[in-house]
């Protein structure tokens, strides 16, 4: 276990292997010149290399020039100081992230769809190749039940479609936005979400396929403006949708 040095500062690293010095190495100086390395590197130089000090090129002796093992009390104190310092560091990180708790960020692989006919308000249906499945591999579809409402064009639903790749989500947005189906206009845009809750608590996320973002340029960005894709262009990419009318082929299938 690497610990803080005896002055309470950050752990000292071996200049050769760049690993933090173990507690038994803190008072280990194998050469009379005072150049400090870990015991592993000292042993490697003596047994596998030229046996010379990397700093002054003096031959290492059988016994280190200066080695005073720490007492049990000193070891316990250093370990306690390291635990306290780690705790304080984690608390600072958590405090610094509190302002992000209610922030919503654009997720570039997430498509938000509004104006869906209620007959398409089903995750398995939207995953089909003739709908959003044709643009790329879908990670998840969530139907937003709270936004179903009856406007001037009748009841509609909204959904979140999460793709594995950002470029597939953008293709879906460009192709489907402004398509008219069952007499209503479907609108698409990049969806927004909150940061991963485990990240907010400075903890590793237990979900290997977690799609929640962390502050990184690769997963966040500005919201794109509404795309003006025409119905004719959209029908080429999503041919099952017919402008201004219900596609009887899919009505029978659903």
Image (spheres, helix red, strand yellow):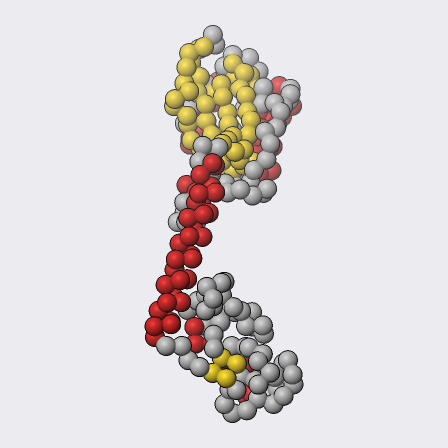
Residue 95 % position (x, y): 44, 43
Residue at position x 45%, y 52% from top?
A: 89
Residue at position x 39%, y 22% from top?
A: 146
Residue at position x 55%, y 12% from top?
A: 244
Residue at position x 60%, y 32% from top?
A: 222
Q: Which quadrant of the figure has residue 175?
A: top right
Q: Does residue 209 lie above or below 158 as drawn?
A: below
Decide if residue 238 is on the left or right side of residue 25.
right
Q: Does residue 115 lie above or below 124 as drawn?
A: above
Residue 113 % position (x, y): 50, 25
Number of numbered discs visible in the structure rendering: 0
Residue 66 % position (x, y): 50, 84
Asked whether residue 242 appears in the rendered view, the answer is no
Q: Does residue 239 lie above or below 208 as drawn?
A: above
Quarter containing the N terminus: bottom left
Q: Residue furthest top?
A: 152
Residue 6 % position (x, y): 45, 69
């Amino acid at each position: 276990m690497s610990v803080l040095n005896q002055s309470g500062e950050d752990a000292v690293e071996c200049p050769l292997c760049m690993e933090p010095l173990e507690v038994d190495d803190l008072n280990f100086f194998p050469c009379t010149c005072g150049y400090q390395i870990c015991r592993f590197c000292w042993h490697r130089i003596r047994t596998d290399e030229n046996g010379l000090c990397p700093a002054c090129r003096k031959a290492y002796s059988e016994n280190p020039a200066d080695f005073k093992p720490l007492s049990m009390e000193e070891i316990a104190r250093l370990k306690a100081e390291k635990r306290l310092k780690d705790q304080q560091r984690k608390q600072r990180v958590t405090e610094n992230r509190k302002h992000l708790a209610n922030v919503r960020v654009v997720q570039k692989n997430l498509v938000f769809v509004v104006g869906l006919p209620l007959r398409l308000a089903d995750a398995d249906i939207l995953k089909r190749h003739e709908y959003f499945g044709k643009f790329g591999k879908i990670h998840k579809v969530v139907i937003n039940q709270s936004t179903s409402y009856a406007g001037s064009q009748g009841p509609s639903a909204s959904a979140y479609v999460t793709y594995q790749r950002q470029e597939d989500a953008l293709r879906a947005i460009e192709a489907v936005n402004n398509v008219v189906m069952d007499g209503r206009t479907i609108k698409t845009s990049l969806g927004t979400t909150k940061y991963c809750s485990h990240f907010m608590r400075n903890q590793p996320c237990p979900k290997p396929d977690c799609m929640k973002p962390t502050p990184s340029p690769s997963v966040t960005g500005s919201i794109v403006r509404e795309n003006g894709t025409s119905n004719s262009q959209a029908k080429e990419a999503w041919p099952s949708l017919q402008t201004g009318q219900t596609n009887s082929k899919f009505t029978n299938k659903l």
